[in-house]
Amino acid sequence: MEPFEFVSPSSIDEAVKTLASNGDNARIMAGGTDMLVQMRAGRRTAPLVVDIKGIPELNAVSYDASKGLTLGAAVPCYQIYQDEKLSAVYPGLMDSASLIGGIQIQGRASIGGNICNAAPSGDAIPAVIALGGICNVAGPNGTREIAAEDFCTAPGRNALENGEILVSIFLPAPQANSGANYLRFIPRNEMDIAVAGVGSSVLLDASGQNFVSARIALASVAPTPVFAKEAGDSLAGKAVSEESIQQASELAQAAAKPISDMRGTIRQRTHLIGVLTRRTLNNAVERARGG
Amino acid sequence: MPGVTQVQTTLNGEVVNFLCEPRQSLLECLRDVLGMTGTKEGCNDGNCGACTVMMDGRIVDSCLVLGVEAEGKNIMTVEGMASPEGLHPLQQSFLENAALQCGICTPGFLLASKGLLDQEPAADEGRIRHWLAGNLCRCTGYDKIVRAVLQVSKAK
Amino acid sequence: MTSNQVLSEVEYSVVGTRPVRPDGVDKVTGRARYGDDTNLTGTLRAKVLRSPHAHARIKSINTSKAEAFPGVRAVITAKDLPFASLSKDELGGEYGGLKFASDHMMASDKVLFKGHPVAAVAAINGHVAESAMALIEVEYEILEAVVDVREAMKDGAPLIHEDLRTNDMGEIGDKPTNIATHMSYAIGDVEKGFAEADLVMEKEYTTATVHQGYIEPHNTTAFWNSDGQLNLWTSTQGSFQVRSTVANILRLPVSQIKVTPMEIGGGFGGKITAYLDAICAVLSKKSGTPVKALMTRSEVFEASGPAPASWMRVKIGVKNDGKMTAVETEMAMDAGAYPGSPVMQAIVCAFACYDVANGKVDGYDVVDNKPKTAAYRAPGAPQAAFAVESLVDEICDALKMDPIEFRLLNAAKEGTRRIEGPIARRIGLVECLEAARDHDHYKSKVGKGEGRGIAAGYWPNRGFQSSVVMTVNYDGVISLIMGSVDIGGTRASIAQQTAETLGIAYEDVKPTVVDTDSIGYTFITGGSRTCFATGIAAVNAAEDVKSQMISRAAKIWDTNEDDIEYVGGMVQHKSDEELKFSFKDMARQLATTGGAISGRSNVDPSGEGNGHAVHMADVVVDADTGKTDVTRFTAIQDAGKAVHPSYVEGQMQGGAVQGIGWALNEEYFFDDSGKMMNPTFLDYRMPTTLDLPMIDTVIVEVANPGHPYGVRGVGEASICPPMAAVGNAVSNATGNRMRSLPITPGKILEAGWENGKS
């Protein structure tokens, strides 16, 4: 690896100042599980590494049943899925947190880092999009919010501007009769990059027989994770049925623009989006009904 | 020449100080700076678990942790598992169950298994297999490793 | 309900038990020193600059900036290797071979695969070496590359070696080609055999390039001292092999090189070739200090020795009752950049499990722009077994015949002649098949939505040279010295055979693996040979100790040697009951009666061990995604005699799981320019704990007549059946025949779409 300097700012202000004044010469490090691999491979080196794990807001997890969850960008995955309360409230998020890499990776990698890394296959991103996540950003010009579905702009590129950092991710408090699920397809049972992934969240009416609304997001089938708005919207007001779910899955397939590469072909990925959309919708429905 | 940082960390229960460049991984610092060669390099990109150590009670791939990040942390490597009284029960079980052939993955598996049983003393086969999926072994096919961990686990 | 069975016919005292291995404590405490743990004073770190192109001419190399980089102590290119300054006249007939060996180590004029070394840097640490390496300027003329075995065989394919001509059964061709060798064997009359058949089936199969996947990358530390002595510390399967390779490339007498084998983190055949040693030696000579190198994982994938991809055509004719009347195969394997794929072994093992009067096998060794292949556990046979055992399964389907009954009907037995000539002595294939038929796994119902597959496999297991010395310490403990590197528990198994022969306790044998100066020539640990051949050497050396003990007792008792016998660890007079010593008592006498006793043996045992294996796999396939999960697996193998059953089980389970990976997910992906796209464990997908069930085992013991305890060797046959076992299981689960490895989810989906069956 090329040499670099390493700094650990202890406040958002300090981090923002350092990043703003160093521009492209600085890289943010959270868990480091993507960053170090990339730097070793000569992709995206930088003379200054800014470690954000010492900033209190980025390590904070605060949940309020009325407001929702504010998840610090540097909070490692294991901390999320080992939290009994959060696991009960956000099972869809737990699906992702427990899929990223293996146990060792989950000891360091964070949801925030996964989102900022902006891989088309990022396992956290569809779930966060489906759950209506908002990214809280701080920068030289103050703070702003970016909807999760707008955060990734190109493979490996995110919407952060010079000097900005992702502080936390906000997930709204789940409403009654809602449920979410993330599934991905991989050839082994762990440790693989998703060939295709789908995150679905649904809101049912009080009877549990009809959709009120749904959000569906896709991984690995476009340059960035895809918010399949039409697919989710198609369920609004519809009965929970094989037909409505099938139609949504076809719309999700239409929203997918995969390529063929060594991990999968266009046909395979498109097919899997259909399968995974149906499965995640069914699982989300079951969770919404209290299952 | 690039600058070096002084790092103070607790390693296998003892406070140690070492110098390293920021670009040196914890794995590199353990092996090349501190001479603790029990932790192994298999891939250097977090995909094989041979470099697994425990940091503040969590298992991590030391190839993906920087040496400078060890500051103030509590680190356990395979060299810290046995005591003067004897081998750790997992080490003993690995020997009795022939859970190693070439042995290169063994330190990583021992730390990873310890990490599991520390948290879930009665982990069953399913939990063991899930937890250890980040550690690759090419010699054993994992059968005897899983049995060795099961023997120490309090699972019925 | 998992199980490990040993179907033992002969019981011994120490052989057949499961003691803790002598190197075990060091390995579980992190004290065992593997190659990269070597740390001599003043060691520099080396990095190798490798070709980014799959096929190119080297036009120029400029290393001046690298040499000037702070912290760099030496830079080399092929110009620094002896071959560069030796002419064709000087080398005569050796020229071709040395050019291949030296160029493979570091390219002189052409690079033949992505990752081919072109230069190397030694510096104060690896980061500095890497930065300096980036400053080496190489001008390449990029050539068209070919990375498919059948494409490489075609007329008009880019030529890897302009001088290569096909050796066609001994006749050298005159056409430039990538086909290095064509070989063929035949038995009986294959035309007649097919004419007699009631059913003839012929299918084609392909397999992809795969890697042994050992977790420890290649490594070495070289110190070329100013007195001319070259010391190497390395993780290798064969220290003498390293010595001779380096001696050849550096034009040194073997005695000037000492190789110390460190502990080794897996090999499976891939750590026989010495990739880094000569490079580090020359860097050491230039810098005057020790130089150490460790391959990165991507270097291991791109620039060590994977197993070849293959194309195979198999044809089998049978009678309606299942009796095979004729067999035929044509197999092409890619050797990578230099000739020498194991296609010959593939074609001779292909039908070795069957007794068929008529057969013809043809093999083609083909070069292409991939790294030069190396052995991978029964080299060549796993690919062949996949094809043959898959076709046999289709035939069983067509005949509605039980796959084990079919194999029993046609099984090779004692007296069966293999297609290349050897006649089998006592072998245990039938016993393995019977054990499979009688196993709970086979008797259990196939689960709903699951499929079951059976397959058999064979590997000859040959002996080769081993050397053992053992000294009797005055406290009665044996110091057992061997050159066989211990990868999978052979310190234990050789010690067990020693203890058994001497009639002493396992704990009283202390094995040590030594360097090339300290023991006679010993061939690699590999080839399923160590427990067999080094075992024979140990047994012979122990017999040597016994006879010397008898001589010594004769001296002590002032009697004839003929009156003394060695029985059950006791040296005793045949008629005088008062005159006897236990081994320990005898040992105590040695100091005052003439000094130490050392036994020795150098062997080169002939005859094959003949290893047979039968595997059974149950799988469930998710029809919507193509995902396969192995739900149950049983590995059955004839070990002859399992000296240490736990380590025999380990070999069976390890081979089975490598086979499962080979079957389902492992392959090299190449882009259009011939570059490997997945040189990481992320995308070269080996099985993890979560991908597997327990691997049940049955050790069959049909004693090998060629070994004192019946040992056959077990390391390799275990990788021959699993791909077809899994492939047949998938076929039975999905209704679609899978004839191309790996059987990925994508391929399963495609087969379903093509055949309208899911």
Image (cartoon, rainbow, N blue to C red):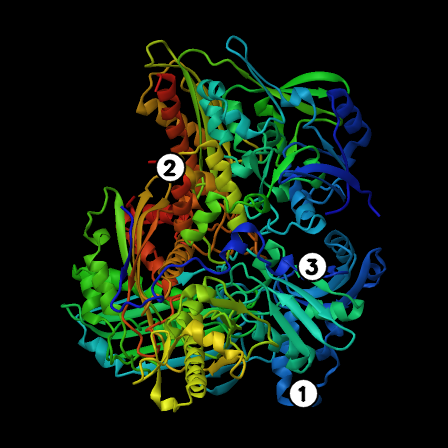
Q: Position of residue C591 (x, y in %)?
A: 53, 78
Q: CA distance from mark 2 to mark 3?
A: 41 Å
Whether callout 3 and callout 1 share a subunit is answered yes
In this rendering, is residue B75 above or below A167? below
Instruction: Give the quarter of the figure containing the C terminus of chain C.
Output: top left
Where is mark 3, residue-wise? Answer: C39
Residue C449 in the figure: left or right of residue A151: left
Name the one closer to the observer, C510 or A278. Answer: C510
Where is mark 1, residue-wise? Answer: C91
Secondary element type, mark 2 = loop
Number of the front mark, 3 or 1:
3
Q: Chain of mark 3?
A: C
Check residue B124 in the rendering and tell me which mark sits there, or answer none.
Answer: 2
Name the one closer to the observer, A36 or C436. Answer: C436
Q: Chain of mark 1?
A: C
Q: CA distance from mark 2 to mark 1?
A: 64 Å
